[in-house]
Amino acid sequence: MGKNLELGTEINTYIHELFHMHLTNCSNLGFLLLLFERECSFALEAQDELHYNKIRELSEMIFNRTIDVQEVYANNQELLWIEDKFDSHFKRKSFELKPKKYQDYCNEMSVITNHEILNNREKRYWIEKICLHALNTQISSDEFLNALKSRQKLKEYFSEENHPNNRLHNALEKYSRNENFEETVEINLHKFFSKIKELGIIKHFNLKLPGWDQIATIMNNKDILNQINIKEFSELTQKRMDEKIKLFDFYNLQVDKVDDISNHLDFGVFAIKNCEDLTNKENFYFITETFIGTIPSYVSDEAPYHFLNNPEIKVIGISSNEFDVINMKPSYIDVKDTPVVVLVESYTDAKEIINKILIEGELYIGDLYDQSMNNFSTFLFFRERTEPKIIFIFPTLKKLSIRLIKELGIENGLAYSKNEQFIKVMSVFGNEVEVLKFAKWIFSFIMKSSCRFTVLEDPVTKMSFDLTRLLINVVMKIRIPDYYNKWAALPTKKTVGEPYYALMEFDNEDNTGAFKAINEKTIIFFYNKGDALNYKKSLLKKNSDSHNLDVVGIDRHYWNAAKNHFSDIHLNIFICYDARGNIGELKDLQELDGIINKSYKVEL
């Protein structure tokens, strides 16, 4: 991603990912992965955690065995596309810029791509035919269905001739000998679903869901589609293909093994638990980005969990594949003092997590650039208001970020990196310098960049320009201690009282931090939300300037962030129990702290 951004060839990434999605949509194993993804989504909605984990595990095993074939296909098709759209010189340059691992993927098909008689259309045809053969496993066979019953059975099934890599190599050998490698693969969709439902592999997905039944009917009856159907189906297919595009993929990182990764730490490290390369399954696989000589590189090392106690680690990164969405916490890491950043790898994951936050909490979300910027890709940063130590980052196409925000109806809550509200997502780092260090680290990791902020062509400079300028502009402002954490903890209009409510000033949707007060040293908390609303109405009748006041809940998260500041400035708090009867009392801050931290949410 970083190299394409630096050279201005981001479209290559998009085309490459479209080829991945085409192979997924057209192959049997790809179809199964898409089905498992939908099943996981429905299991998540049903809070069926055991089934969700089971299907996710099977899906990851199958996906891992399709990676090499996918990369052989996408890399070769991408280069042929570049040659068609540009020229052979640009194709050669693109090949040279690829990491060695990706060059090896390209060379797998050299018997076809170097063929002097075949034209590019014919080359694309044979590459697709061979790669489809590799992934067109007989998924409706009893042997395969039986293998889905456990990890061990599935591992054994893929151990020899059924492995996609072996199917690819066998097909290539037969092609080079001019022998037929095709086999008959027939799948009756309804019978296949019936079988996997009987086995309990599919519990929640239903063929009669909107859209799928129509597609199944078309597939079975070979109906002739009219122009409207074609347009709708094409749009649906394009949307699904867009959703599958990954601008960052852990599975395809070219990583160099080092003896001690602690020698390469720079602010943070990524921790991966589900990794086949682990020699000790109790350990974690740690990855970071560093320089080998003068070249930005990924390095890795295997180490026990307690390695994360290293004081040089200021943030821990994980993949969204290892984040428990049902319980909204990392699957294998405890969130304690060190913040966790979740690198979201798919549109589906991003939508599920954001939707979960919207339903159960309060969302902070930011996009690097607004729609006036003609950039191909972007990063979405988001988190739940009361969980500052868990930050989500989703590198994606700009068109997908726009679509995601629109579909979820959160346009009004979106901040851009040139706006100070954007920093709320990263408030846990405390000040502008630490936020900048975090931004440098995460952008460098995702884009494998040298992160030379003084060089405009550097991809990190391009992506973080507005954010860097914002941080430089605000760094000299005089702030109270731990300002960003207190500021980001301010209640929103959605915050529920634990148990109190107050009137606070808003600038549009943004809480300014100012309370409606009795005097300079005394503010009012209401025990009853209705009393707070009635008090606001009475103020509006007396003073039209009160229109910018809104009722907010005072919850534990805000109270614990602000209470020391309240104590430092000797603030008094008057608790109103009954506004109509003018019943209330001044409360000692220490006593109030005990009440709030033992209370339940109250929405009276």
Image (cartoon, rainbow, N blue to C red):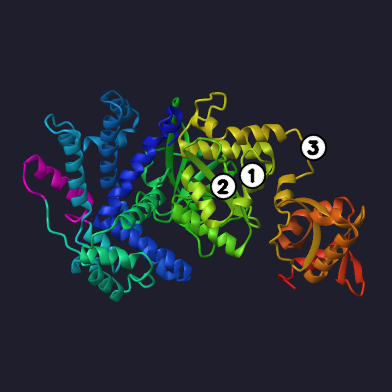
Closer to the camera in the image, 140 or 235: 235
Q: Is residue 331 visible?
A: no
* Vertical arrangement, residue 448 with respect to residue 65, above or below: above
Residue annotated with mark 2: 381
* Image coordinates for residue 182, horizontal then vertical, percent: 12, 52
Closer to the camera in the image, 220 or 337: 220
Identify the residue shown where x is 26% and y is 42%.
72
* Image coordinates for residue 258, horizontal then vertical, percent: 41, 38
Q: Is residue 296 visible?
A: yes
Give whichever of discs 3 and 1 has the lower sequence position.
1
Secondary structure under tag 2 reads strand
Quarter of the figure with the C terminus: bottom right
Real-space Cα distance between discs 1 and 2? 8 Å
Secondary structure under tag 1 reads helix
Give whichever of discs 2 and 3 has the lower sequence position.
2
* Image coordinates for residue 447, horizontal then vertical, percent: 46, 36
Identify the residue shown where x is 38% and y is 66%.
39
Dot 2 alpha-carbon crowd within 10 angstroms: few under 14, some 14 to 19, many 20 or more: many
Look at discs 2 and 3 and give the one toward the viewer: 2
Dot 1 alpha-carbon crowd within 10 angstroms: few under 14, some 14 to 19, many 20 or more: many
Residue annotated with mark 3: 478
- Magenta-tinted stretch: 159-181
Q: Are marks 1 and 2 in contact (CB under 8 Å)?
A: yes
Residue annotated with mark 1: 422
Give whichever of discs 1 and 2 has the lower sequence position.
2
Which amino acid type is shown beneath numbered disc 3? Ile
Q: Is residue 180 magenta?
A: yes
Real-space Cα distance between discs 2 and 3? 26 Å
Q: Is residue 284 magenta?
A: no
